[in-house]
Every structure is written in C-alpha cells, then in structure tokens.
Image (cartoon, grey):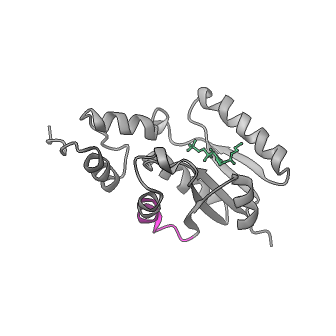
Amino acid sequence: MKHVIAIYPGSFDPPTNGHLDLIRRGARIFDELIVAILRNSEKNALFTVDERLEMLRECTGQLPNVRVEAFEGLMVDFARQSGAQAVLRGIRAVSDYEYELQMAWMNRKLDATLETVFMMPAGAYSYLSSRLAREIASLGGSLTGLLPPAVEAQLRTRLGVPPLEPK
Ligand code: PNS
C-alpha cells in the first residue's frame, strides 16, 4: 500500500490560522504531514525556532498524522531524509504564484522525485500573512479570528503591546 509523506515547510513566524487551515487540509489527503520550520533565517525572526515548534505542536496536537520539526539547509535534503514524496505549499492569491512557481521549479531541478502540491487555504485567510499579523499587532490592531488566541497573546507580549480591550 502506498504511504505518502508530505512536508509543509515555512517560516511560521508566527503560525497563523491560514497555516493551520492548510495543515488540516494537508492532513486529510496525505498519510503523514511534517510541518517543517526553517532554521536558516532564525536570526531575523521574532520568535525562536523552539518557540515556533512549541506553538505549532500545541495547535496541531489533535492531528495524529501531523508532526512538527525544524530543519536547516536545503528543503529538498530534509524532504529526502524524512522519506517525503511531496512538498505542500499554500497559494492565497495570484501574487503568490510567481514566487511559488519559481521555488517549485528550482526544487524540482534539485530533486526531480519530489512533487510540489499547491493548496488554497479558506478564503477567509486569503489576505493573511505572518508579516501582516506582526505589523497589525505591533500597531495595536485586532487579529481576532486570524491567529490562534495563544499565539496572538504571545505575539502581543513579544512586541510589548498590551492586550486589546473588548469593544
Ligand atoms: O514561509 P516561507 O518563508 O514562505 O517559506 C519559505 C521556505 C522555508 C519554504 C523556503 O525558503 C525554503 O525552502 N528554504 C530552505 C532553503 C532552500 O531549500 N532553498 C531553496 C528553495 S528553491
């Protein structure tokens, strides 16, 4: 029987409900899904890799075929070491497509046996990114429904922004 392992690589700084939506969708079609946090860019990140590992493990604990790991170096090397046959990436809008296509082609050049699979998150997350979440939080805006509540609280604490008063 075929057992398909996919990896879902990213920065997840911080994880958003868009990421979680994609993880749930991926977990439904792949036998195993490895959420893989990139270590390379740790120096410029708001949260450490360990903090992101903990946040994502907390948010995906109820999905038995999902595990969260960190990786360093080339994504294709990590995929090979993990026995993955597919890479999952989310496409929110046409604007994502060009960058994603370039990465997918380059990854195919590096390892032709690894297939990139694109999935769309729910429309409600089509405008959401970790970068915008960091910016909105730093300016005191509401992220209700866009981040897991525990992640939103950690983000405000990290940015030194007080919790929002209920309206
Ligand atoms: O969440 P992001 O920042 O869009 O994720 C980008 C990521 C981590 C998927 C990409 O930068 C990556 O795979 N980096 C690992 C190094 C690598 O393999 N680079 C070649 C990509 S073609």
Residue 58 drawn in magenta: yes
Q: Name the image quarter holding residue 109.
A: top right
Count the labels in the image. 0
Q: Position of residue 137 (x, y in %)?
A: 30, 38
Residue ranking furthest to the top:
95
Which residue lies at the image location 71% right of the left edge and 47% below the top edge?
Answer: 117
Q: From the image, which quarter does the C terminus lie in?
A: top left
Q: Position of residue 104 (x, y in %)?
A: 74, 41
Q: Position of residue 2 (x, y in %)?
A: 79, 68
Q: Please say if 14 is above or below 4.
A: above
- Residues 50 and 124: in front is 50
147 with respect to 72 (left or right): left
Task: Write down which quadrant ligand 1 falls in.
Answer: top right
- Residues 95 and 102: in front is 102
68 with respect to 165 (left or right): right
Residue ranking furthest to the front:
43
Q: Position of residue 128 (x, y in %)?
A: 45, 36
Which residue lies at the image location 45% right of the left edge and 50% below the top edge?
Answer: 15
Q: Main secondary structure of the magenta part?
A: helix
Q: Name the image quarter holding residue 102.
A: top right
In the image, which residues are magenta?
55-64
Residue 137 drawn in magenta: no
